Image (tube, rainbow, N blue to C red):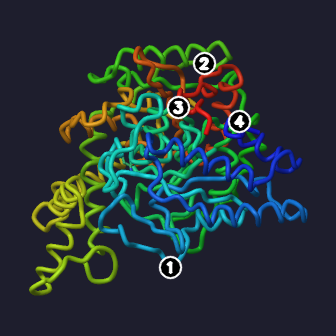
Amino acid sequence: MTDLHRLSVRELTEGLAGAKFSSRELTEHYLKRIEKIDAQVKSYVTVTAEQALAQADAADAAIKADNATALTGVPIAHKDIFCTQGIKTTAGSKMLDNFISPYDATVVAKAKAAGLVTLGKVNMDEFAMGSTSENSFYGATANPWNLSHVPGGSSGGSAAAVAADLAPFATGTDTGGSIRQPASFCGLTGLKPTYGRVSRFGMIAYASSLDQGGPMARSAEDCAYLMNVMAGHDAKDSTSVEKDVDNYVANLNGTSVKGLRIGIPKQYFNVAGLDADVKARVEESLKKLEEMGAILVEIDLNMTESYVPTYYLIAPAEASSNLSRYDGVRYGYRAENPVDLMDLYKRSRSEGFGKEVQQRILIGTYALSAGYYDAYYVKAQKVRRLIQQDFLKAFESVDVIAAPAAPTTAYKIGANLSPVEMYLGDIYTIAVNLAGLPAINAPVGFDKDNLPVGLQLIGNYWSESQLLSVVHQYQQATDWHTQRAAIAEENA
Ligand code: GLN
């Protein structure tokens, strides 16, 4: 078969189980595509061909022996923030360019246990700080819909790989939008779970109280398959929650759009930088949901103006603490010929970290320093609580909240926005992380330049099944999620 990359995850599981093709054929097919097409997209930092083929053969043996899970033999790409034993894990940083983890992240271990085949590790903004993937030490990744545009970030490699059909699905992480915004820019479905639903063990830390892993794929159905693997309590992550996991695939038809109350925050649709095409596509998608029986309810989210300043204090504060471990001594990059210990620290960190990361360490250290702690950090924590309360109040009258995922479509590579312009692009995603809520992006059309637009649905705590189900219903009634970029149509 020449078009294995066009199959959905469900079709892949059925084809493997029914011996229509083997995991080896499927894996070779993807490796061939990566070899031919990824020179243009640059989504992979590391391709693990040899290991993938060995995993594929093991998967084929397990399927034959009737010892397989639903996903045994299906390929996957992992964001290069998840530690992989024996395979380089860089987090997009020169600091970790030589880092080989001695253990697997829990998410990676679970993927292996489910029989998934690791194709490789995909690109990202350095330490997940950014919205374009241009902050990677390994250079920019291209958006498959238009190669001169960014795929978004920080999980830009994950999004680009899936959108170019260089992996059926991928893991991502979301600290302030890094699953939802690249999914939006690349026309994909991406789910940021409730904080604590997916283990953070072995996921390189950016801002620990906000970081959360999740699936990125073409459809809600494909995401549900991966969510079934990723979700669950982990004794190795003290913030992971001991709560039963749903069967997200079985629940795909569990929520009806009929009677679903969708909150439309007034403040969100009056944001100055909201692109007219994005607004129009999001409104059309809401109209469609209304036709399907949803009830649109105007709501207030009064804290909207506080989102960006609050996030850009808390996230850098936590980052400055988390990144203090990279000291040139224990692991990672080490400056050459240090004259003394201070010189070793200073130069290892100045040479090993890129500009955006250094900028955030400076901001975070400032906000946490003795004289400013109360004025900035403590105050931001208080505002964070108000933001959460704002959402909880809204959820008293609605089931989900609708928003764009981003105010614009994908930027041009090299657009070189100022930090403030770049940070304002996170307005629709970061409050969800501050509140610890789940949210999903679904593709809902294109702008005048044929770049994808995304609709974000924010749910109450632990409503992942509901979000996936609502998007699944929408995707049964529309075909935005089946549209492919021209480069994905190319055969290897
Ligand atoms: N763009 C946001 C930032 O730069 C979000 C990144 C993320 O979710 N990892 O912090």
Q: Which mark is residue 343?
A: none
**Residue that appears at 49% across and 28% down:** 454
Judged from the image, the secondary structure of the residue bearing numbered disc 4 is loop
The C terminus is located in which quarter? top right
Q: Is residue 244 above or below residue 15?
A: below
- Cα separation, mark 4 vs mark 2, equals 40 Å
Question: Label for residue 102?
Answer: 1
Pointer 2 with pointer 3, Cβ within 8 A: no
Specify the amino acid type for callout 3.
Ile
Occupied quadrant, residue 341: bottom left
Horizontally, residue 158 falls left or right of residue 128, namely: right
Q: Which of 36 and 82 is in front in this view?
A: 36
Of label 1 and label 2, which has the lower sequence position? 1
Q: Which of marks 3 and 1 is in front?
A: 3
Tell me which residue sits at (83%, 44%) in the image: 14
- Of callouts 3 and 1, which one flags the residue occurring earlier in the amino acid sequence? 1
Q: Quadrant of the N terminus?
A: top right
Q: Earlier in the sequence, mark 4 or mark 2?
A: 4
Mark 2 C-beta to ligand 1 under 8 Å:
no
The residue identified by callout 3 is 487
Q: Name the residue under label 4.
A: 3
- Residue bearing mark 2: 295
The residue lying toward the viewer, choosing from 260 and 51, is 51
Amino acid on which the number 2 mark rests in the picture: Ile
454 to the left or right of 230:
left
